[in-house]
Amino acid sequence: MYDYTALFDFFIRYNEAMYRYAQSLVAFVAVGQTGAFVKAARQLGVTPSVISHHISRLEDELGETLIHRTTRKLSLSENGKRLFEAAQRGFEGIELETDRIKAGSEHIAGALKIALPAFVPDPNLETRVMEFMLRHPSVALTLEYSDHIVSIVDAAYDLSIRIGDLPDSSLTRKKIGSVQHVFVATPDFLIRHGTPKQPKDLESMPFVSMGRSNDVFSLIRGQNTQEIKLDVCQLSVQSILAAKAGTLAGVGFGNLPEPLVADDLAEGSLLRLLPDWVLPPLSIQAVWMGTSRRNSLAKRLVEFLQQ
């Protein structure tokens, strides 16, 4: 006959050990994704000392070094890389199943802090965000508009909506739309500098830059693609609205979202340059940390925006 009391005690001790082990694994995966104890701590809402404690305990239990620490950076050991990949797969499986369970419930609650560009080129995007809130009264959103791109982890954003290609990272991203930019200038600017006939003509004309170190663009007409580099710049800004203001003032020609200048083009206060040539469309992407505590709510909002 089984000693059920002893068996029960064993499972209690076993589950407690596994709970502690799971906490340490979560801390370890957060460090692996963010590359820093401080960023992992901010992501999980704890102090860096708690993260350090969990990593040390995990290494002690396994008897292996998982993270090489120097004064300048952290790197995963070979064993650490294998454990990181396995833990990520396990957490993704758990997340998938919990999301399926939650999807069966109509009640969605929580708060998200969202970063957006100063000008959202798709007006339906903001409409959909508001519709999501109306459908789910227990959801609270904080929307912060800026063209200054900051780290989601450092700035404690739950979700970021950005335009164009983004650097490769461990962040989760989904395309939710696209926007077409156009080169435009005022009629007075074209009187002073001439009307460009071909893409290379733009290289000698003053340009309102968005602060890039390298303003290189590809223009497409049918099967023909030409690359141009714009470095004649009197005005450099970090705001799309400031770029429009500089363009309207005639300081230079601008590279602006078509929805932002649609009224100006219709009125004639701005003219489109090289109308036979087009710039490649830019993606509108939703970006978020896959291990965030609000990951599930961020995913639900993104899925709603994709519909």
Image (cartoon, rainbow, N blue to C red):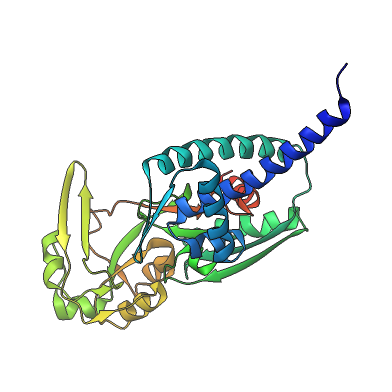
Q: Residue at x 37, y 80 (%)?
A: 245
Report the number of discs: 0
**Residue nearer the viewer, 29 or 56:** 56
Question: Is residue 260 shown above or below 299?
Answer: below
Tell which residue pokes out farthest to the top in this image. 1
Residue 31 % position (x, y): 48, 54
- For image coordinates 35% across by 62% down, the residue present is 70
Which quadrant: the C terminus? top right
Residue at the (57%, 54%) spot, across then down: 54
Q: Would residue 49 be found to the left or right of residue 216 on screen? A: right
Using the rendered view, name the quadrant where residue 263 is placed.
bottom left
**Residue 263 as seen in the image, left or right of residue 203:** right
- Quadrant where the N terminus is found in the figure: top right
Give whichever of 26, 184 is nearer the camera: 26
In the foreground, 54 or 31: 54
Splitting the image into 4 quarters, where does residue 205 fall?
bottom left
| Res 145 visible | yes
User: Where residue 74 sits: x, y (%)?
Assistant: 38, 57
Q: Nearer the viewer, residue 77 or 237?
A: 77
| 259 relative position to 46: left or right | left
- The location of residue 206, given as percent across then percent down, is 18, 76
Residue 13 x %, y %: 75, 39
Q: Taking 13 as reference, is 212 above or below it?
A: below
Judge whether residue 305 can be spotted in this image: no
